[in-house]
Image: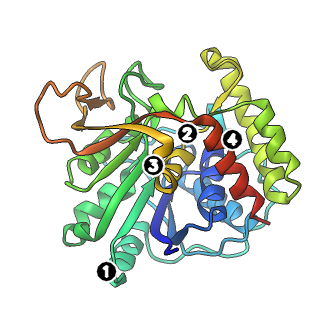
Amino acid sequence: MKKIPVIIDCDPGHDDALMLMLAFGSGLFDVKAVTTSAGNQTQDKTLANTLKILSLIGANVPVYRGCEKPIFRNLVIDDSVHGESGLHGIEWVVPAFQPETISAVEGIARILSESEGKITIVPTGPLTNIAAFLLAFPNLKDRIERISLMGGGIFRGNMTPLAEFNIYADPEAAAIVFAAGIPVTMCGLDVTHKAVVFQKDIDLFRAIGNKSGEAAANFLEFYSRFYRENRIELEGGAALHDPCAIAWLINPDMFKTKSCYVAVETKGELTSGATVVDFYNVLKKAPNTEVAYDINREEYIKMLADAIRSLP
């Protein structure tokens, strides 16, 4: 089976770490590079965390440092969920390799320009790097097969009532990405709050018995504390957001989706950072996004466990 060529753009983050485990452990992706965004923590920390998690799972691919801050706004980080380091529980890992010397935008451009076929981009943090690439290299836009992202929401937010963190952190970048004319899959809060892990799932990952399973369980033990204290509607579960963007590429039938027109609000006093999803086709505009809103949770957990099982 031919592997899917991807560039992953992430801001580790515990759910980013599980996303990377799924991407590499599934064996289904030709990961051309990993680029880092500032979001869950600063660029210094997300870059360090990326190198550590890739070293932990034995994945040596090019890593490129991304933009330091949003295009027009000050940096907002999400350390209340992920801790001071951005990835509590991986401090002990020594990176086995160093990042590339050119920027994420330059790295994406180089990979796309040298590729024989189109490449899918998987962003699981703020969309700053992707928007900066589209602005700098519009001639390479057609070399992107699809953007499968984690971010946004149809009917809810988590930073404001309507804005999800990744979009809220850099709404101007998100607006550029959704308006670029590239096929987009959006795994927002409506689906990721159904992609939850419970203690029994954490125990399952730990019982796999390899170091990746132990690390995944440790990550989720810490990560789950926030959700158990602050998202009681999830009934003890923790929303494992970011792996959904990879899981959809592996098995889209595991999700329920709807083709919708999506735009991003950048100026609203109460709605800045909201993904405006025309779920009921009020505007009669051509859909630009495949919007996920439900998932087979049991299949999702099995997919993650199978991937972790194949790692060191």
The residue shown at (37%, 73%) is: 106
The residue mark sitting in front, 3 or 2, is: 3
Q: Give the secondary structure at mark 2.
A: loop
Q: CA distance from mark 1 to mark 2?
A: 31 Å
Amino acid type at image mark 4: Glu
Q: Nearer the viewer, residue 268 or 110?
A: 110
Q: Position of residue 67 (x, y in %)?
A: 42, 58
Q: Are marks 1 and 4 in contact (CB under 8 Å)?
A: no
Distance between mark 1 and mark 3 Cα atoms: 28 Å
**Precedes in sequence: disc 3 or disc 4:** 4
Q: Which residue is mark 4?
A: 84
The residue labelled by disc 2 is 241
State the residue at coordinates (50%, 72%): 3
Tag 1 and tag 3, C-beta contact below 8 Å: no
From the viewer's perspective, tell me whether residue 45 is left or right of residue 95.
Answer: left
197 to the left or right of 209:
left
> Tag 4's secondary structure?
loop
Cα gap from disc 3 to disc 4, whole angstroms: 35 Å
Residue placed under numbered mark 1 in the picture: 113
Numbered label attached to residue 252: 3
User: In terms of sequence position, does the residue under pointer 1 or pointer 2 come before the other?
Assistant: 1
Residue 78 picture location, percent across and down = 56, 36
Residue 237 or residue 300, whichever sits in front: 300
Three-letter residue code for mark 2: His
The mark that comes first in sequence, 1 or 3, is 1
Question: Could you tell me which secondary element the residue under label 1 belongs to?
Answer: helix
